[in-house]
Image (tube, rainbow, N blue to C red):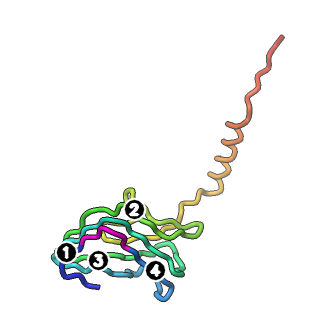
Amino acid sequence: MTIENDLTLAGSSIFELDSDTVYDRTWVNTIANVVGRDLTFGGTLSVVDNGVAFADGQIFDLFDWGSNSVASGNFTDVYLPTLSSGLAWKDFGGSQFNYADGSIEVVANAIPEPANMLLLAVGALVIGYPMRRRVSL
């Protein structure tokens, strides 16, 4: 969809992602190609999963605006689909929506290495183990 005037979002913006499209770091769902116009984010952004096989590195471009346009504002709330274990939505400075380019991105969770997990487990045992002192009578 191309918007030829300023666009201000104030209610609910809902995007549906489905499995009919192959997502491999592809830009999808281009909504606002606003050249020389203002795009103001507001209200609630909800993204609905309709069967996407999410993977690390996928970028979904929900909004697109021209280099002569200005994007401003913030969504009050951003609701994204729950991802499978090992994946997370990228954090863009406190928001999972990237206000710089109008996208959301799937990333792999940082999983601690086995040696670090062992050290954490041993540390928890040491801290949780009651200290006993011998008392001389």
Comparing labels 2 and 4, the label whose residue is closer to the camera: 2
In the rendered image, the quadrant that contains the C terminus is top right
Spot the residue most to the top.
137
Spot the residue most to the bottom.
20
Asked if the residue under mark 3 is in contact with the one under mark 4, i.e. CB atoms within 8 Å, the reply is no
Q: Secondary structure at mark 3?
A: loop
Comparing labels 4 and 3, the label whose residue is closer to the camera: 4
Amino acid type at image mark 4: Leu
| Residue under label 2 | 77
| Residue under label 1 | 6
Comparing labels 1 and 3, the label whose residue is closer to the camera: 1
- State the extent of the magenta-drawn residues as a range: 8-13
**In the rendered view, would you say 120 is above or below 55?**
above
The dot on residue 17 is 4
Amino acid type at image mark 3: Asp
| Residue under label 3 | 64
Asked if the residue under mark 3 is in contact with the one under mark 1, i.e. CB atoms within 8 Å, the reply is no
Mark positioned earlier in the residue sequence (4 or 1): 1
| Place of residue 66 in the rendered image (x, y in percent of width and height, measured from the top left) | 22, 77
Amino acid type at image mark 1: Asp
Mark positioned earlier in the residue sequence (2 or 1): 1
Q: CA distance from mark 2 to mark 1?
A: 22 Å
Q: Residue, x 47% and y 75% (percent of image)? A: 48
Compare residues 93 and 116 and report the one nearer the observer.
93
| Place of residue 45 in the rendered image (x, y in percent of width and height, measured from the top left) | 38, 69
Residue 51 is drawn in which quadrant?
A: bottom right
Q: CA distance from mark 3 to mark 2?
A: 20 Å
Amino acid type at image mark 2: Asp
